[in-house]
Image: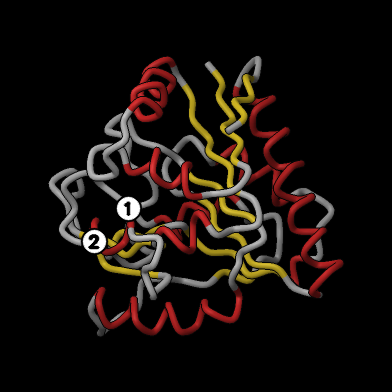
Amino acid sequence: MDLIVHEDRVEQAKALAISVAADINVALAAEGRAAIAVPGGSTPKAFLAALAAAPVDWSAVTVMATDERWAPPTDERSNERMIRAAMAAAPIRFLPFWAAETTPMEASRALSDRLAPLAPFASVVMGMGADMHCASLFPGGDGLEAAMAPSCETLVLPMTAPGAPEPRVTLTMPALAGADALRIIISGEDKREALDRALAERDPAVAPVSAVIRNAGAVEVHWAP
């Protein structure tokens, strides 16, 4: 794992966008298409805006969230809503996880089938919580053991957890760690301390992010104060 320290969050957003755009363009040159997964939350907004301005043929790129709250895109907590807004400058092809009149389990099965031809993804960017969760792989999650298994046969699973107010759907270990490039974006001293704790923890049920890092190939962590 490489830890990349940025002077501030503006530099972090720009540098990470350059790296992910390069991932995409490598995949486009090799395969003619690419798929990327990006995080929700507040920290990635500047990165996503910078990525939208990158020289990429977005018509050949599928963009998705790493995970989604089970809420429609009209909801303020929707990751889809945030990502679409942050990347509004680019004509992205967004693949939604939430679907009306279905359950998280039903949606997960359909999504996994739909994503299988797109894997491995050209680039996955994850956030990380102070509780050491990533995507919706939460400590204490009811589906965590299945989702964290490297042999998991599905790319998406539903998840409920004490730290998550609503049900979620999330990319699983093979989808996250199996990406051609995996990067983590974190900011603040609390997240830096959480990363240190995670790297020292070997139990995936306690520190899911650490298990994803250990199962991935090359991993970059982009940190800014």
Horizontal and vertical percent position of residue 155:
42, 70
Which colour assignment does the render follow?
secondary structure
- In front: 180, or 151? 151
| Secondary element at tag 1 | loop
In this picture, residue 63 sits left or right of residue 99: right
Q: Which residue is mark 1?
A: 136
- Tell which circle, 2 or 1, labels the residue nearer the N-terminal end: 1
Of residue 107 and residue 88, the one placed in the foreground of this image is: 107
Mark 2 highlights which residue? 159
Q: Quick check: 225 above or below 55? A: above
Q: Residue at x 60, y 48 (%)?
A: 217
At which x and y percent is residue 134?
38, 45
Check contact, mark 2 vs mark 1: CB within 8 A: yes
Q: Is residue 99 above or below residue 167?
A: below
How crowded pointer 1 is (Cα within 10 Å; few <14, some 14-19, many 20+) is rated as many
Residue type marked 2:
Met
| Residue at image point 43% right, 78% down | 112
Number of numbered tags placed on the structure image:
2
Percent x, y for residue 173? 41, 58
Q: Which one is nearer the viewer's eye here, 194 or 219?
A: 219
Q: CA distance from mark 2 to mark 1?
A: 7 Å
Position of the N terminus by quadrant: top right
Considering the numbered disc 2 on the image, is that residue within a helix, a strand or a loop?
A: strand
At 75% from the left and 73% from the top, the residue drawn is 33
Callout 1 amino acid: Ser
- Which mark, residue 98? none
Measuring from the top left, give residue 199's x and y in whole percent. 40, 28
Few, some or many residues within 10 Å of mark 2 (<14, 14–19, 20+): many
- Residue drawn at point x = 40 percent, y = 24 percent: 191
